[in-house]
Amino acid sequence: MAKYLLADSGINWLAIMALLTFFFIFSVALLMVFGRGRGSYAEVEKQPLIDSYPLTEQNNPS
């Protein structure tokens, strides 16, 4: 029924559904990012500092 009401008013209902879908997915993504506690990022914040491949003269001749 809503489809017929929107068809008479000249509003593109597919564009409205796409916009609502975007905002829904964006809101869920924001909740997932900001809903996590600081403890869950403890391993991730140390990753750039962990040197799993140490530089030696053989690997880096500069």
Image: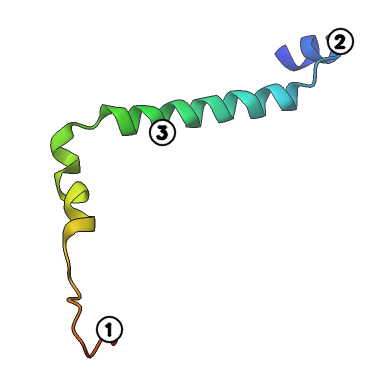
Per the image, the residue denoted by label 1 is 60
Report the amino acid beneath label 1.
Asn
- Element on which disc 2 rests: helix
Snapshot colouring:
rainbow
Which dot marks residue 29? 3
The CA distance from mark 2 to mark 3 is 35 Å
Based on the displayed image, in which of its 4 quarters is residue 53 positioned? bottom left
Q: Position of residue 10 (x, y in %)?
A: 86, 14
The CA distance from mark 1 to mark 2 is 70 Å
Mark 3 surroundings: few (<14), some (14-19) or many (≥20) residues within 10 A:
few
In the image, 9: left or right of 40? right
Q: Residue at x 57, y 30 (%)?
A: 22
In the image, 14: left or right of 24? right
Residue 33 in view, yes or no: yes
Give whichever of discs 2 and 3 has the lower sequence position: 2
Based on the displayed image, in which of its 4 quarters is residue 1 positioned? top right
| Residues under numbered marks 1 and 2 in contact, where contact means CB atoms less than 8 Å apart | no
- Element on which disc 1 rests: loop
Per the image, the residue denoted by label 2 is 8
Based on the displayed image, in which of its 4 quarters is residue 7 positioned? top right
Report the amino acid beneath label 3.
Ala
Q: Residue at x 81, y 15 (%)?
A: 11
Q: Is residue 44 above or below residue 34?
A: below
In the image, 7: left or right of 47? right
Q: Position of residue 30 (x, y in %)?
A: 39, 29
Mark 2 surroundings: few (<14), some (14-19) or many (≥20) residues within 10 A:
few
Residue in front for this viewpoint, 49 or 60 = 60
